[in-house]
Amino acid sequence: MDELIIVESVLRSAVAIILVFVVSIVIHEFGHYIVAKKCGVAVPAFAIGFGPKLIRWYRRGTEFSVRLFPIGGMVQLAGELPQDTLFRKGERLAVEFDDEGRIQAVGDPSDLPRGQIATLEDLDLMDRLQMTLAMDDGVRTYPVRPHARLMTSTRNSMPIVERHEQVLGKPLWQRAAMILAGPFMNFLLAGVLFTLLNLHTGIPVNSPVLGQIVPNTPAAQAGLMQGDRVEKVDGQTIQNWAQLVKAIQSDNPPKPLTVVVDRSGRTETLVVRPHLVTVQGQKVPQLGVNAPVTHDPVQAFTSGFASVYYGSVNTVQLYGQVISHHQFQDLSGPVGIADVISQQAQSGVWQVVFITALLSLNLGLFNLFPIPALDGGRLLFMVVEMVRGKGVDPRKEGLVHFVGFALLMLFAVVITYRDVTRLF
């Protein structure tokens, strides 16, 4: 029996970890995907997970796939870097032609074994979509068919597209919209999940109406009932929940209180003596009554998205404290986050919903930081472009993002190593 319980716990944790990571990351990538498609950018691939493909299907020019390691996901947009940078002048290539003499496939000879061998002399894959090749019959310039395949392996390829389907071929505002769509979807998901939590648990209301009465507490023993509206405590008029709490906690150690309540139109007077409960290391007088809650959908919605705003503000402040006070030991990587998800999964599905909302919020916010390789870093280059009136050389920008990504990966490895040593 104990072994079955352990297995169930492990499975529950594994499923929760996979779902939380996949949902939070895939919704982010879906934001990039859907806005890119609306802007007319080609999206060659959308993957759930990493590693070898388990299943794949095609829809509207995009290869969708589910991969072996179901943690995360990715979306590939055409033309984020100049397509010319995918080739080197003077390199040997294999090419295939269609019936009209246009290049329909190109790649390394090992990836395109049936192609004709050629040496690349020149190319323009931004505007004219053409390549100049040296072959046995001489040097000629060949047109490249739109969506010709660039073979990245014997089984995988990416399309070569016209300028109007490239990210770099779009105006600044559309490129910014594609970038912002990822974090926006994370914030939207967090708001929706917080709203669902509010509908499930209810939202506290600042009203002197008693909520659920905790059994075997002073309130239950004195005869207080859920739904009672407190009118007075020791002669003091009570108009809201905050005043009720203040009246209960005004004396410490507590003394008996005379409570006047309206119960379905009848006035009842009861005497109740608060007991002391330890809250954050301090003894606090309490009756054993929960605050009233509402399940109103409108309030649940507004409170849910307000939680996204205040959660973002608090998170930024926490990051500021981490940086200013060098409290990097408080940061957690994927392993630390997975451990938290595993613990919450044992408490039920709604705790998993809550941790998913928090992770989605933090993922969206973190991606907006102006760090190379993140969405915020790309937006920073767009701000520079807007101020200068022209963009930074895409090759140089790509190098900056590559270095930023390498540093982020190094930082993630360090944090992960620390999480592993702390947990095991």
Image (cartoon, rainbow, N blue to C red):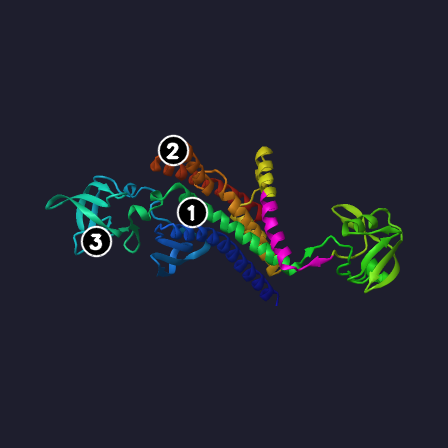
> Which residue shows up at 31% across the image and 47% down it?
164
Query: Is 157 contained in the magenta span?
Result: no
Magenta stretch prevailing secondary structure: helix
Residue 28 place in picture, x, y as percent: 47, 51
Q: Amino acid at mark 1?
A: Met
Q: Which numbered dot is residue 178?
A: 1
Give me the C-alpha separation between circle 2 and circle 3: 45 Å
Q: Is residue 397 above or below residue 341?
A: above
Residue with the most extreme top position: 388
* Circle 1 Cα neighbour tier, 10 Å, few/some/many (<14 / 14–19 / ≥20): many
Residue 56 place in picture, x, y as percent: 37, 60
Mark found first going from the N terminus, 2 or 3: 3
> Which residue shows up at 57% across the image and 64% down it?
8
Q: Are marks 2 and 1 in contact (CB under 8 Å)?
A: no
Give me the C-alpha separation between circle 2 and circle 1: 20 Å
Q: Amino acid at mark 3?
A: Pro
Q: Amino acid at mark 2?
A: Gly
Residue 305 place in picture, x, y as percent: 59, 51
